[in-house]
Amino acid sequence: MPEFVSPSKEGKGIYQSSSIDKSSVETLEVERKKVQEILRSLLEDNPDVLGSALISNDGLVMASSLSESIDQDILSAIFTALESIAQRACRQMKFGAMDKLVLLAEKGGAIICPFKKEYLLVLIRGEAKLGIILMDVDQAIERLKKSISMSSSKDSDKSKSS
């Protein structure tokens, strides 16, 4: 089982800074824990999933269930470039918004699913049952959207009452 790593090498969440008040930091930490649990369950519920990560469009790993043997900085840079190229190809070809990018190779593959200002990356085994994985990924995305939007709406409710 891969060890779950902090989003930054200093052990702080990527959202923590001196310009954010304490309640916002606490809310973001709760959000990060929910995201981490969703990624963990994706890994635990499907033996064909090797790991997953929520990565910002800037290439920052926000949360992950990746093995420590994987260099997250290199992985996020490679797949952020792929995601950007695929998004551009969809626009150029007038396909509309990209839903998923599926990369299949002899010994494994990856699924990239963009949403909001980040994307979900799922690494899979070469012999994986793609249909089942895509269903699991769709469920994880729905859970992520709900988790992130609930935290965002709580933040906006707090700012309105201030």
Image: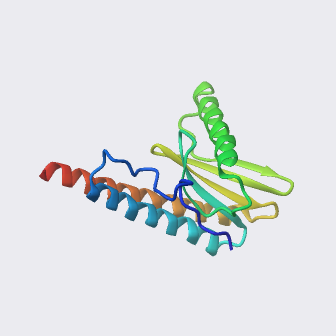
The quadrant where residue 154 appears: bottom left
Q: Using the image as rendered, state which of residue 81 and residue 98 is in the foreground.
A: 81
Image point 61% across, 47% down: which residue?
A: 100
The quarter of the picture where the N terminus appears is bottom right
Residue farthest to the right?
106
* Residue 33 in the figure: left or right of residue 138: left
Residue farthest to the top?
92
Residue 83 in percent (x, y) is at 62, 40
Residue 92 in percent (x, y) is at 61, 25
Residue farthest to the left?
161
On screen, residue 16 above or below 85: below
Residue 53 in percent (x, y) is at 59, 56
Image point 51% across, 58% down: which residue?
A: 141
Total labels: the figure holds: 0
Residue 135 in percent (x, y) is at 60, 63
Q: Using the image as rendered, state which of residue 33 and residue 142 is in the foreground.
A: 33
Image point 76% across, 64% down: which residue?
A: 128
On screen, residue 27 above or below 88: below
Q: Using the image as rendered, state which of residue 11 and residue 154 is in the foreground.
A: 11
Figure colour scheme: rainbow
Image point 40% across, 56% down: which residue?
A: 148
